[in-house]
Image (cartoon, rainbow, N blue to C red):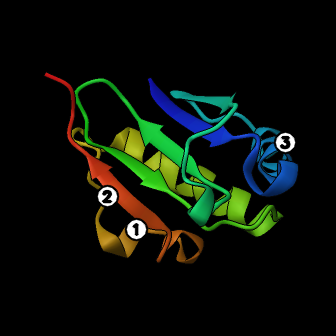
Amino acid sequence: MTHLIICQTCQQKNGAVLYDLVSEGGSREGLKITGHECLWSCASACSVQIRADGKCGYHLGGFQATEDAAAALLDFAVEYNLSPTGEVDFDLWPEGIKGHFIARIPPLL
């Protein structure tokens, strides 16, 4: 199961709008979308984490609460979910995801 976690307090609640847009974007097999109160990356708001057991995770930020950003996050999450390691070939990254990566988090052992 891939978890897409969206900060709901970013940019004076724009994170909550981004969360709503992603949630309204439709369900994807193997993807769980949740909101969180604060991901402590206010300088890079709106922020998101994507992770799954046994895979590297990612912390992303600097998104606007738009339908394009929501679609890019969902498209990347689908590719991430299909990857056995969590690594997604750059050629498969949606344009809207490029430049938003803050950290790559190693998988928990």
State how far apart marks 1 and 2 are (Cα).
Answer: 7 Å
**Image side of residue 43 versus residue 25, left or right:** left
Which quarter shows the C terminus? top left
The residue tagged 3 is 20
Residue 9, compared with residue 75, is above or below; it is above
Residue 25 in the image, given as x and y percentages of width and height: 78, 46
- Whether tag 3 and tag 2 are in contact, CB under 8 A, the answer is no
Q: Residue at coordinates 57% horizontally, 48% vertically from top-left?
A: 48
Residue 74, compared with residue 93, is above or below; it is above
Quarter occupied by residue 28: top right
The residue tagged 1 is 92
**Image side of residue 52 versus residue 24, left or right:** left
- Local crowd size for mark 2, using a 10 Å CA cut-off: few (<14), some (14–19), many (≥20): some
Amino acid type at image mark 1:
Leu
Q: What element carries label 1?
A: helix
Give the label on residue 88, or none: 2
Q: Which of marks 3 and 2 is in front?
A: 3
Which quarter shows the N terminus? top left
**Image side of residue 84 versus residue 43, left or right:** left
Amino acid type at image mark 2:
Val
- Whether tag 1 and tag 2 are in contact, CB under 8 A, the answer is yes
Q: Residue at coordinates 22% horizontally, 27% vertically from top-left?
A: 54
N-terminal-most mark, 3 or 1: 3
Q: Which of marks 3 and 1 is in front?
A: 3
Give the label on residue 74, or none: none
